[in-house]
Amino acid sequence: MHWLVFEEGGLPDGTEVAYYSRGKKLLVGYKQGSGIVCSCCNSEVSPSQFEAHAGWASRKKPYGYIYASNGVSLHEFAMSLLRGRKSSVKDSDDLCIICADGGILVLCDGCPRAFHKECASLSAVPRGKWYCKYCENKFQREKFVEHNANAIAAGRISGIDPIDQISKRCMRTVKNPEEAEVIACALCRCYDFSKSGFGPRTVILCDQCEKEYHVGCLKKRKIAELKELPKGKWFCCADCKRIYSALQNSLNSGEERLSESCLGAVRMKLKEKRMDFVGDLDVRWRLISGKITSRETRVLLAEAVSIFHDCFDPIVDSATGRDFIPSMVYGRNIRGQDFGGMYCAILTVNSIVVSAGILRIFGQDMAELPLVATRIGSQGQGYFQLLLSCIEKLLAFLNVRRFILPSAVEAMSIWTEKFGFKEIPPDLLVSYKKTCWQLITFKGTCMLEKMVPKCRIIRHEETEAEAEAETETETETETESDAPDE
């Protein structure tokens, strides 16, 4: 059952864990993928190896002595996942655990064991979930875990459901080990936090701008007075809530076909290359989130990954060797890097993905575009510029102030001369990263920015009125030209 901890839906990546013995913390690390990144060797190891690094290789019970930062052992967490897991018939034994015979069996919902009704001392086949005596005994033992010295030392608080808190925000997560010194409350700029329970130093994260706040600082500044950790999404201000809502609407709306008036530059470049389309040029763009996918969008995201791999050198984590690009496209976390707020912008031509970009919006302050590329066979045809224009119009509609991206030195002149970006001075970049520490920078690149131009929102009624006026003018002109000469 312990493998459930590292499966999808188990312990979140980045969760801080520690090995305890006799009420003392011996070793610290954080959960990542299918293992634990150990602080003593800075490498990903198995729970058994983590136990060995803590000096207790002979104990051979890692899951019982490795705790999350709110006092829950990995064993206890695995038990909670087991209770909530839907059991499959194919996972269960096909022989009775008592008499080793087959026949009509009652299956335990907590483990693979199977029983004859009579062998389990049941008067009737139970309705709903049923747990065998072995599982029931385990559950009973877990009830006394909060009195365990290791659990208390790890932060267990009586009266609070620690399992429930795992899915909320009291868990300490290691977000970016290399830049941990810049992570602080956005209001008081202090780095301390409460790793267990709920109080003034509990840290809460805005689900749009991703800034961190002390609960006490929010109350002191009269921004929010929280009595408990909110369920679902939480936003630090009305602007973040508005931006998130607009992005969700964009996801739900799906693709948007671009009008012919937007395709002038594309038509011109195609004509220059003698590739002018005969007939319809169906160009569409859309925003996709890897967290909300369908069969159609999964295909589009896979094509975006392929384009980035074709156009960029691999972006690989030096410690694990894992490729960052798919995680960024699908908005997944990898080795403490939080990519959950990323969206993928897609431009298609006649249903083929030609350009893609990864977008993340840090509230109204700024947005970043860490990767953007065009399919190799479609480069130089104006599609890159068209996708960038669509993204800028979205940011203008959302009232985002500045647009930031990394650029290779040899490509800087294109960004600055053609698209209006300018290089960010080092001291200003440091200032930006103090409030948006997740901002992605790549070695060997320069960080550029531009202010997002304000957009004029044209109402539907205005558009119809302008169209009617143009039609009337054209009719009058035609009438005058058709009139006989006097």
Image (cartoon, rainbow, N blue to C red):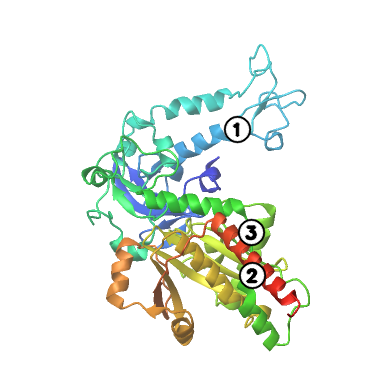
Against 71, residue 302 (above or below) is below
Between residues 375 and 468, which one lies in front from this camera angle?
468
Q: Quadrant of residue 119?
A: top right
Question: From mark 1 to mark 2, how far is it between C-alphas?
Answer: 41 Å
Would you say residue 156 is visible in this rendering?
Answer: yes
Q: Residue 192: percent from the left, percent from the top?
A: 24, 51
Counting from the top left corner in percent of width and height, residue 254 is at 62, 55
> Which dot, 3 or 1, sits closer to the camera?
3
- What label does residue 306 carry, if any? 2
**Nearest to N terminus: mark 1 or mark 2:** 1
Looking at the image, tell me whether mark 3 or mark 2 is earlier in sequence order: 3
Under mark 2, the amino acid is: Ser
- Give the answer, above or below, for where 191 lies relative to 75: below
Residue at 76%, 77% (x, y): give it. 484
Q: Dot 2: within a 10 Å radius of its alpha carbon, few (fewer than 14), some, or many (20 or more) residues?
A: some
Disc 3 residue crowd, few under 14, some 14–19, many 20+, Cα 10 Å: some
Give the residue number, with chain letter if any, for mark 1.
Answer: 111
- In the displayed structure, 316 sits above or below 175; it is below
Q: Amino acid at mark 1?
A: Cys
